[in-house]
Image: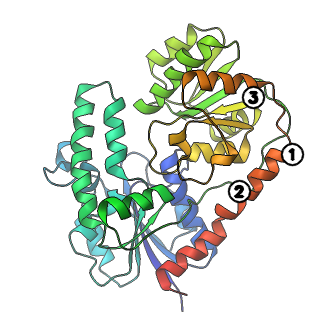
Amino acid sequence: MDKHLHIVCLDVPYPVDYGGVFDLFWKIKTLHQLGVKIHLHCFEYGRNEQPELEKYCVEVNYYHRNEGHKGFSTTIPYIVSSRASSALIENLQKDEHPVILEGIHCTYPLYSDKLKNRTTIIRLHNVENEYYHHLCRHENSLFKKAYFFNESRLLKAYEEKIANKAKILAVSQNDADTYRAEFHAKDVRYLPVFIPYQEVNAMEGMGTYCLYQGNLSIAENEKAAIWLIEKVFDHVRIPFVVAGKNPSARLTRLAGSRCQVCIIANPGEEEMKDLISKAQVNILPSFNATGIKLKLLNALFNGRHCVVNEAAVKDTGLESACHIASTATAFRDVIVQLYRHYFGDEEIRLRKKMLLNTFNNEKNGRELMKEIWGD
């Protein structure tokens, strides 16, 4: 008998050009390859309808997201209330197929008790109240800071209310543990993210620069890049490249005033892969420990040495593949050492042993199918 599955996505999961859609797209593609008949539901707010998704789904439905004041609620987080769609609920209620809700963002049908007696899974992308708390801490705009603070407050209450309404599959062990401890979730476990990298392609040898990469329009990522420039690379004579989406004028000016620092704005997928593979050291500090850092997985599969702080790898199982530093001085010391250290076969073998079994799309796809259908 055919296995049919509804997947509700917070955004259109193609093209795969930012971290939030990696797990979405590669899960869809993997389940399709395993024979699942996917009924896809996407909130579209700027990425447009994508015919590519029709290759992997028996149907693709798009819904308008109520952005701005139309999506605000005094009791429900904006990321949820702006995706409260009666058309989505109507489509989900046409049959009894299992449902995956991608992120807390898509859980309004569950919250409103419209999925009673259905096999329903929440794919937890982050502990969202903690994520928004960190966004608040690192935001400079008072308006955005107030929004992030309020969203974090609403999310904490909301996440507690839905923590036992469905099975939860978290992208990190740390997030699963947090839901058990903080929200007393009874049915939560870790299922690794689905990713495009299924082979370790890190190259032996020596690179010529250090690299930080990420979405630079996010305040936390910009803060990390500025911290690295001012606190680390102002004190070492090593070339440093900052690459990512939409760098601000401030960050561009800051990099331009240093002869050893350069900004690469909006690199394409292949250019970013090339930058990662040719770097000697990939440097990826993080200011929050929620979720899984997909840019770190990209660096581990495709790059040489990786330097992180504890928050970037906490409870990920990736600790032994990275060099961990906690202060600017420690980052400087490790980077200077690694910049002259040959990246060899021993490091590559360690990564293969650590990564290939955990982040195996087919294996994890079959595990997901067991969670849904129990066979």
The amino acid type of the residue labelled 1 equals Asp
Helix, strand or loop for disc 3: helix
Q: Residue 345 carries which label?
A: 1
Q: How many neighbours does mark 2 have within 10 angstroms: few (below 14), some (14-19), or many (20 or more)?
A: some
Quarter where residue 269 is shown: top right
3D distance between C-alphas at marks 2 and 1? 14 Å
Which sits earlier in the primary sequence, circle 2 or circle 1?
1
Please give the name of the residue rendered at 57% of the width and 47% of the height, measured from the top-left corner.
294
Q: Are marks 2 and 1 in contact (CB under 8 Å)?
A: no
Can you identify the residue that label 3 sits on?
338
Can you identify the residue that label 2 sits on?
354
- Residue 250 percent location from the top left of the image: 44, 15
- Residue 23 percent location from the top left of the image: 53, 57
Please give the name of the residue rendered at 26% of the width and 64% of the height, measured from the top-left corner.
108
- Residue 361 percent location from the top left of the image: 64, 65
Which sits earlier in the primary sequence, circle 2 or circle 3?
3
Q: In this view, does 250 lie above or below 170?
A: above
The amino acid type of the residue labelled 2 equals Met
The amino acid type of the residue labelled 3 equals Leu
User: Looking at this view, is 6 or 103 the one in front?
Assistant: 103
